[in-house]
Image (tube, grey):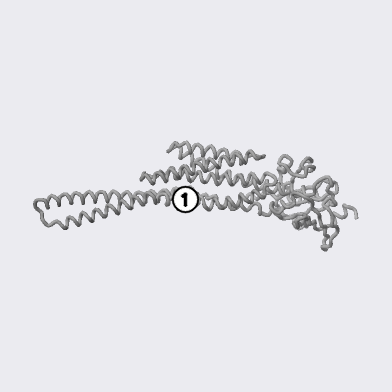
Amino acid sequence: MSEDKMLNSINEIVVSNPTGGELSFEKITDAKFESMNLYKEVFVSDLSLMAGNVAQTGLQIANQGMTLAQIAKQAPNGLFTATTNPANLSKFANGTTSTMLRDESGRIVQHAGFADVGLSTAVNPAIILSAGMQAMSAISGTYYLHKINAQIMDMDAKLEELINIHHDTNIGRLIAARKGLSEIANREFVDTTDLAAIRSYKKTADEIHEESITRLKRQGSEERKLSDIDFIIAFEANKLSLFAELIEIGIRMKIEGQIEIINGLRMQLKQNYANSFYNKFDLEVEKIYSIIQQQSSDEFVDKKDKLEKSLNELADIRNFTGWGKIKQGYNMAVAAKTIFDGNKVKKKVELENENLSKLKNDMRKRKENDIIKIIDEVVELPYKEAEILYIPSENNKHRVFVRMEDEG
């Protein structure tokens, strides 16, 4: 059977790797061509093909999307599709592969190396799947980087507002870090120097967060009024640190061979969010406030005890002449002073509670656009299934298309 006739007769291409992983490409039927989903073609440079890997510079993704019907017109030997995820496709990125070809009845037409479907033996067969994998990761990474960047851009207004009412070097450093992260998130091509920069910006945010928390704890132990600004700086710094982790994952999705690292980072991000000051600010603020509140409460109890003692001493005095009269006057003055001090401490406790409630409400508003939704989406990216199209050809011009990311 000629290669042309063989390609037209097959209904399924099952690609296998030595470790037992399989990916099944099924021929698309005419009924599915009515779908209006858009796909972009993946182009791989000859240098990348010969080298057996897909570098960023060797991978290009078409600017314009095409429908299945449009692509099918360019696929004389049939158009095949598989739904998979980057983590699964990474199994095929290196090493050899083999294929099983089945016709419409399910009968095996041929069981051979991938090269027998038309791919030159000088090229690593898995490069086609590797290109599709990286394209899927790059498209998803770019899409979520844009979403992340849109959220961190909103931080600027909040930070500028803070610096207007409280000029602080740390606020300026946070603004600079925010802008640096945004610039990296918008880059088309990235490399390891960008990853180092992201880690540096995250370190800056973490240092500012810790500095603010330490200052607040010290203020509490010294019975000073807690600074709401320090709470907010700690909150915004911690949020920026989480954004830095998100951006690192998005950037790594645009670089080949990062799936295992991404898997570690996504689990770390989920845990860091769960334990973060940003997420648990209610408890963390109360914890710090409790230091000074306990001191105020102890002081109030002490004043109350002194008042009761003064009143008891007044009640014990029976002789209102001479020394008894003098002592009564003294005890009355002490009681009055104790009442005044007690009311003052009581007012202080009430004011602290009001400030705590106001601060928590303010920070709750700052968290209205919580980043947990985008964190959940990003940590699932390595296992987010997407559609990949494959056009086999007898002239060594194999073509791969990937589904465009939905905008919704």
Q: Front-most of 282 and 389?
A: 282
Name, please, the residue furthest toward the right: 1
Q: Front-most of 239 and 160?
A: 239
Name, please, the residue furthest toward the left: 321
Q: Is residue 28 visible?
A: no
Q: Front-most of 247 and 310?
A: 310
* Percent position of residue 252, x then y: 65, 45
The residue pinned by badge 1 equals: 281
How many numbered discs, if any? 1
Q: Is residue 14 visible?
A: yes
Q: Front-most of 352 and 306?
A: 306
Numbered disc 1: secondary structure: helix
> Image quadrant for the N terminus?
bottom right
Q: Quadrant of residue 106?
A: bottom right
* Percent position of residue 145, x then y: 61, 45
Identify residue type, mark 1: Phe
* Percent position of residue 315, x then y: 17, 57
Q: Residue at x 69, y 53 (%)?
A: 87
Q: Residue at x 67, y 44 (%)?
A: 254
Name, please, the residue furthest toward the front: 323
Q: Quadrant of residue 168?
A: top left
- Relative to 64, is 115 on the left or the right? right
Q: Residues within 10 Å of mark 1 (few under 14, many from 20)?
A: some
Q: Is residue 304 above or below residue 64?
A: below
* Percent position of residue 384, x then y: 66, 54
